[in-house]
Image (spheres, rainbow, N blue to C red):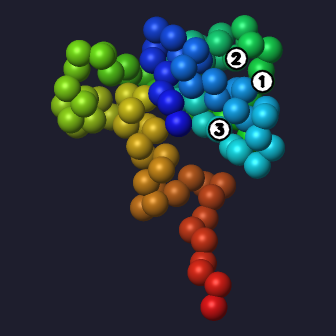
């Protein structure tokens, strides 16, 4: 997986294209909703059940220390994305898989 930056959010991640090419893949794009929505519109992609936009109001600058940003910016795209994969905080539509007996 590659990461986009706020100055070029979709040019690196291509989440909309991944979702279209891989029918079993669900993609969550995290960032300022207006910027992500504009990028999706420019690519003629629309959010849906497999392409989800999760708003994050804060941005982590390239020269910012990641640890400080994680502690100080609770609504940064970095923190929101990490929280999405945290098994202790499952997304409402997800549940933990139960191992087969």
Residue denoted by label 1? 46
Q: Which mark is residue 27?
A: 3
Residue at horizontal 64 percent and vertical 29 percent from the top: 15
Asked if the residue under mark 2 is in contact with the one under mark 1, i.e. CB atoms within 8 Å, the reply is yes
The secondary element bearing badge 2 is classed as helix
Q: Nearer the viewer, residue 72 or 28?
A: 28
Image mark count: 3
Q: Earlier in the sequence, mark 1 or mark 3?
A: 3
What is the C-alpha distance between the residues marked 1 and 3? 12 Å
**Disc 1 packing (10 Å; few <14; some 14–19; many ≥20):** few
Q: Earlier in the sequence, mark 1 or mark 2?
A: 2
Against 80, residue 37 (above or below) is: above
Q: Which mark is residue 83?
A: none
Asked if the residue under mark 3 is in contact with the one under mark 1, i.e. CB atoms within 8 Å, the reply is no
Residue at horizontal 56 percent and vertical 52 percent from the top: 91
What is the C-alpha distance between the residues marked 2 and 3? 13 Å
Against 70, residue 11 (above or below) is: above
The secondary element bearing badge 3 is classed as strand
Q: Which mark is residue 40?
A: 2
The quarter holding residue 44 reads: top right
Res 48 seen here? no
Q: Is residue 100 left or right of residue 73?
A: right
Q: Tell me residue 63's x, y (percent).
A: 23, 15
The secondary element bearing badge 1 is classed as loop
């Amino acid at each position: 997986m590659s990461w986009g930056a706020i100055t070029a959010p979709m040019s690196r991640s291509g989440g909309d294209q991944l979702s279209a090419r891989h029918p079993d893949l669900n993609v969550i794009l995290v960032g300022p909703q207006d910027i992500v929505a504009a990028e999706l519109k420019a690519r003629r992609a629309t959010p849906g059940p497999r392409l989800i936009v999760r708003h994050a109001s804060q941005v982590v600058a390239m020269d910012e220390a990641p640890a400080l940003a994680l502690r100080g910016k609770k609504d940064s795209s970095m923190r929101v994305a990490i929280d999405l994969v945290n098994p202790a905080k499952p997304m409402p539509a997800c549940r933990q898989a139960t191992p087969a007996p």
